[in-house]
Amino acid sequence: CEGPIARIGRVWADGKPFDLSAVTHRLYPGDGEQPADSLIEARQGEAPVYRATAVIVFERLPLEDFFIAYGKQDRRPGEFVEAVEVARLPEGEKLAVYKVTKRFDEDIPAVCGAFRLALDSGSVSAVRIVFGGMAGTPKRAAHVEAALAGKPWSDETVEAACAAFEQDFTPLTDMRASAGYRLLVAQNLLRRFYLETSAAPGQLRLYREAAE
């Protein structure tokens, strides 16, 4: 908003009180001398300066509730996302993102799955699974995660977890894919992630040589 301001009172997000003490943030009150944000400047090399405009910068803001509905995010009029920083993956953790679409580039995917996994002595110590194209917004597969957590990272565990997809998602049928196809693809992406992270022998990807 137009500055300068003295302080922030109460903060609301999606109609609910938001506790600023739970997240790292920096307030720039909107005076004529305020600098660019130091973290954004360090990451990007340069950063915009919003003088005479009050700005709050969040670090590591949880995004799970940011997407409210299709085409609607938890933003007030005039608010925008300046940058998104993705933390470096801790050593030993595994990450994969898969996009299933008719064209690889510049196409909206029928299904997009992101998987993050940490193992401890062969068992799942932490897991995060998120899908796009399976609901009106990007959505976590919470029941699938629960079916994997604490279990051995094995064929049996993964197959049991695949059954939990129906508890997490009720996909739509549209011009890109049917509901049944999306559900099956999501399950198969979990199976693929397991194969690619379990040191299974053999080649798991197919490659085509580009035409001359």
Image: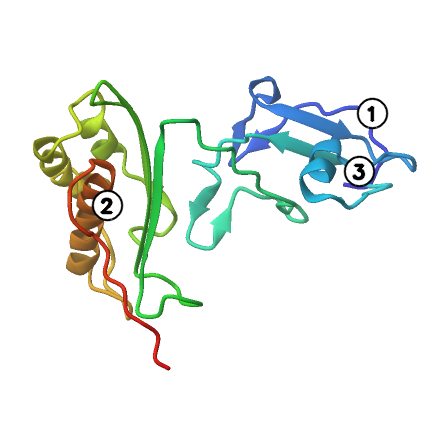
Counting from the top left corner in percent of width and height, residue 79 is at 65, 45
If you read the primary sequence from the N terminus, does the residue marked by circle 1 or circle 3 appear first?
A: 1
**Rendered image quadrant of residue 167:** top left
Q: Which residue is mark 2?
A: 169
- Residue at the right extreme, as displayed: 32
Classed neighbour count for the residue bearing mark 1: other residues with Cα under 10 Å, few (<14), some (14–19), many (≥20): few
* Quarter in which the C terminus is drawn: bottom left
- Residue at the left extreme, as displayed: 156
Element under disc 1: loop
Counting from the top left corner in percent of width and height, residue 23 is at 58, 23
* Quarter in which the N terminus is drawn: top right
Name the mark nearer the viewer: 2 or 1.
2
Counting from the top left corner in percent of width and height, residue 163 is at 11, 40
Q: Amino acid at mark 2?
A: Phe
Horizontal side, residue 15 vs residue 157: left or right: right
Q: Which residue is mark 3?
A: 36
Name the mark nearer the viewer: 1 or 3.
3
Q: Which residue is mark 1?
A: 6
Counting from the top left corner in percent of width and height, residue 121 is at 22, 18
Q: Residue at x 81, y 43 (%)?
A: 50
The label number, if any, that marks residue 93 in the structure image: none
Q: Amino acid at mark 1?
A: Ala
Q: Residue at x 22, y 32 (%)?
A: 143
Element under disc 3: loop
Q: Residue at x 55, y 30 (%)?
A: 60
Classed neighbour count for the residue bearing mark 3: other residues with Cα under 10 Å, few (<14), some (14–19), many (≥20): some
**Rendered image quadrant of residue 150:** top left
Nearer to the camera, 15 or 106: 106
